[in-house]
Image (spheres, grey):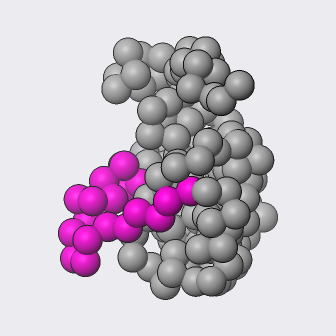
Amino acid sequence: MTYLPLANGNWAYLCAFQDMASKRVVGWQVGATMPEELVTSALQRAFWSQPPTPGLIVHSDRGGQYCGNAYRQLLHDHEALRSQSRRGDCYDNAQAESLWSRLKTEVLERPVFADLADAQRSVADYFDYYNHERLHSSIDYHTPYYAHQQLLPLNALNCPA
């Protein structure tokens, strides 16, 4: 999760889940508060976008929202495994921190979002750009969408008949 500054001095909160192989942002949610529901909504969107195979590892930091019953039940229902950063080791969550850094550098031309709706709209636009237009050196200067499409035939080979 990350904080997004609003013009009125408050914060919006963003939770996103990213496919590590393709770099594609598969589920996200922006809200005015950061309850467990923010995380479960983002994860449910990820599961709708990219149905998980049993044993999927879902990594997060150690925030309380990732320890709640609803979050753990959602993982259990989809046969996904929970992974969390080690206490006090921000490098365990480097992929997410890198995503937040890129988002804030590339979206926040001004110091803040006008309001919650502006933050939601801006994040939606950015993730659309990020997934479909932004080239990534770590995936041979392709877009996450392209990398995901290239991985689909490989995933089909791993599915039970």
Whether 99 is drawn above or below 147: the answer is: below
Check if residue 36 falls in the magenta segment.
no
Residue 150: where, in percent of width, then height? 56, 15
Q: Is residue 97 left or right of residue 46?
A: left
Residue shown at the point (38%, 15%) measured from the top left: 140
Single out the residue that lies furthest toward the front: 161
Residue 113 in view (yes/no) = no
Residue shown at the point (64%, 45%) measured from the top left: 52
Residue 160: where, in percent of width, then height? 65, 30
Residue 153 image-quadrant placement:
top right
Residue shown at the point (23%, 59%) measured from the top left: 91
Front in this rendered view, residue 149 or 78: 78
Front in this rendered view, residue 82 or 100: 82
User: Which quarter shows the C terminus?
Assistant: top right
Q: Is residue 59 left or right of residue 115?
A: left
Check if residue 85 falls in the magenta segment.
yes
Q: Which residues are magenta?
A: 80-97
Q: Is residue 128 left or right of residue 108?
A: right
Residue shown at the point (64%, 21%) measured from the top left: 156
Whether 123 is drawn above or below 87: the answer is: above
Residue 127 in view (yes/no) = yes
Whether 127 is drawn above or below 129: the answer is: below
Residue 93: where, in percent of width, then height? 33, 59
Residue 4: where, in percent of width, then height? 55, 68
Circle count: 0
